[in-house]
Amino acid sequence: MTSLPPCPKCNSEYTYEDGGHLICPECAHEWSAGESADAQDDVRVIKDSVGNLLQDGDTVTVIKDLKVKGSSLVVKVGTKVKNIRLVDGDHDIDCKIDGIGAMKLKSEFVRKV
Ligand SMILES: [Zn+2]
């Protein structure tokens, strides 16, 4: 494995991983693997249509007309959606829209306000 980061203390490339920790054999420095950029698998990152990071409680606007499944309603482009909640799944935003009610959106069709 060459993807491990070098030792932050002595810059040695011969670091190895042990039980979630990274260890440098040269200076015996130990640090948490969570500090490395490779540890992002645990945290689900959801981004909007332009790459802004989304968080629970954010306000977004819809960037294209979206049909509401199972009804004739349409969420119009520009609709403001307050207090979103991020969820797992194909539609990764849970929210409530005025006049429509609870529904799920795809993060690729919104933009953070
Ligand atoms: Zn070191």
Image (cartoon, rainbow, N blue to C red):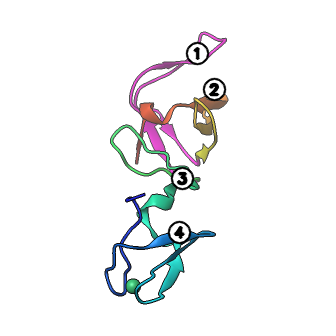
Which one is nearer the viewer's eye here, 70 or 37?
37
Mark 4 residue crowding within 10 angstroms, few (<14) / some (14–19) / many (20+): some
Magenta-tinted stretch: 57-83
Task: Tell me the CA gap for discs 3 and 2.
Answer: 34 Å
- Residue 100: which disc? 2
Question: What amino acid does circle 2 point to?
Answer: Ile
Q: Quadrant of the N terminus?
A: bottom left
Identified by mark 4, the residue type is: Glu
Q: Residues within 10 Å of mark 2 (few under 14, many from 20)?
A: few
Residue 64 at x, y = what percent? 40, 24
The mark nearer the N terminus, 3 or 4, is 4
Structural distance between the alpha carbons of marks 1 and 3:
37 Å
Kindly identify which residue carries mark 3: 41
In front: mark 3 or mark 2?
3
- Please name whichever residue, 16 or 43, is drawn nearer the observer in this view of the structure: 16
State which mark lies toward you, 1 or 4: 4
Q: Residue 77 colored magenta?
A: yes
3D distance between C-alphas at marks 3 and 4: 16 Å
Q: CA distance from mark 2 to mark 4?
A: 50 Å
Question: For mark 4, what is the residue?
Answer: 17
